[in-house]
Image (cartoon, helix red, strand yellow):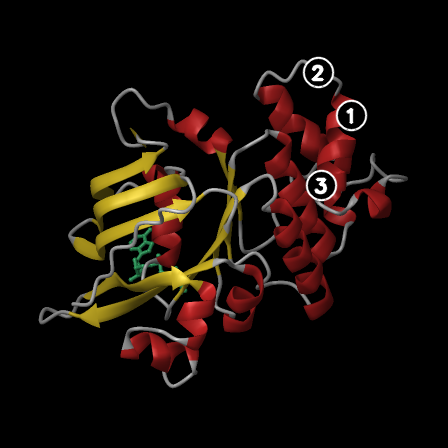
Amino acid sequence: MATNTSTLNSTETVLKTENLNVYYGKFLALQNIWLDIPKNKVTAFIGPSGCGKSTLLRCYNRLNDLIESFRAEGKVFYYGKNLYAQDIDPVEVRRRIGMVFQRPNPFSKSIYDNIAYGAKINGFKGNMDELVERSLRQAALWDEVKDKLRQSGLSLSGGQQQRLCIARAIAVQPEIILMDEPCSALDPISTLRVEELIHELKEQYTIVIVTHNMQQAARVSDMTAFFNVRPTETGGRIGYLVEYDATESIFNNPKQEDTRDYVSGRFG
Ligand SMILES: Nc1ncnc2c1ncn2[C@@H]1O[C@H](COP(=O)(O)OP(=O)(O)OP(=O)(O)O)[C@@H](O)[C@H]1O
């Protein structure tokens, strides 16, 4: 098995997995994952369906805890602190490590309250109007919604809704934003807006994005991790990390043949 360990020396590591195995019940979904996520960069996860990209993403903010059959072995570190240690509060983890999902999922509330709600729950005591404006500006949505902040978030277009969800994630001031195929439900123009936004956001945030769109990974990310699945004798399908490197190397000069085949569209 060609599992690749990569340690990035040039930039600070924010998230680190060490020998991570993930099970759903008896089913081993991900095996032996060693991966360092660098600060203020965009890291893309690519690979065929079922190789465990979303599973790994959800390990970073303990969202898998909500799945009863989920079990993790190994370690996930956030600045050297094990996220699965007994004394870690998953709610606090999810505040620091926010998430944007495949389908835009604004609350059935006003645009303003979509932003304000999470901040209030997190005990925000500052100027809410300022926070709402700042978050919407950072998500490149302010100009389009500033005159209709009291309208429902659900009245926006799909692309606007996704930027609203990004604004909502930003409003609680996370350090990391996880994005699980954030553009897969969007049209090409909205996709481009979100990609531009990702580019701007990495100044302030660390971003990890799962994408099926190879061009998107090549356009938006600095680092790319390629995952694959291998069948087991008993009919299982185990996800593993094939290769992790600078995006440029993964796409132009991959070390593994499987990576070369995948990025050139020969399989997957
Ligand atoms: N809640 C769950 N319960 C049981 N098995 C699950 C669960 N979620 C995912 N799996 C299984 O774990 C494996 C990895 O799934 P995951 O969704 O992480 O892959 P993925 O690479 O993100 O796939 P896709 O690209 O299709 O979204 C798959 O075999 C999937 O069926």
Q: Pinpoint residue 182: horizontal percent, then vertical percent.
A: 57, 56
Q: Pinpoint residue 69: horizontal percent, then vertical percent.
A: 25, 44
Report if the CB atoms under discs 1 and 2 are less than 8 Å apart: yes
Q: Pinpoint residue 65: horizontal percent, then vertical percent.
A: 33, 37
Q: Label 1: few (<14), some or many (≥20) within 10 Å?
A: few
Distance of label 1 from label 3 (alpha carbons):
12 Å
User: Which residue matches tag 2?
Assistant: 126
Query: Tag 3, which secondary structure?
Result: helix
**Which three-letter amino acid code belongs to the residue tagged 1?**
Glu
Question: Is residue 156 in view from this perspective?
Answer: yes
Question: Is residue 268 in view from this perspective?
Answer: no
CB of mark 3 near ligand 1 (< 8 Å): no
User: Which residue matches tag 1?
Assistant: 130
Mark number displayed over residue 138: 3
**246 to the left or right of 4:** right
Q: Is 21 rendered above or below residue 186?
A: above
Query: Tag 2, which secondary structure?
Result: loop
Distance of label 1 from label 2 (alpha carbons):
8 Å
**Which three-letter amino acid code belongs to the residue tagged 2?**
Gly
**197 to the left or right of 96:** right
Q: Is 239 rendered above or below residue 128?
A: below
Which mark sits nearer the N-terminus, 1 or 3? 1
Q: Pinpoint residue 188: horizontal percent, then vertical percent.
A: 69, 69
- Which quadrant of the render holds ligand 1? bottom left
Q: Residue furthest bottom?
A: 266
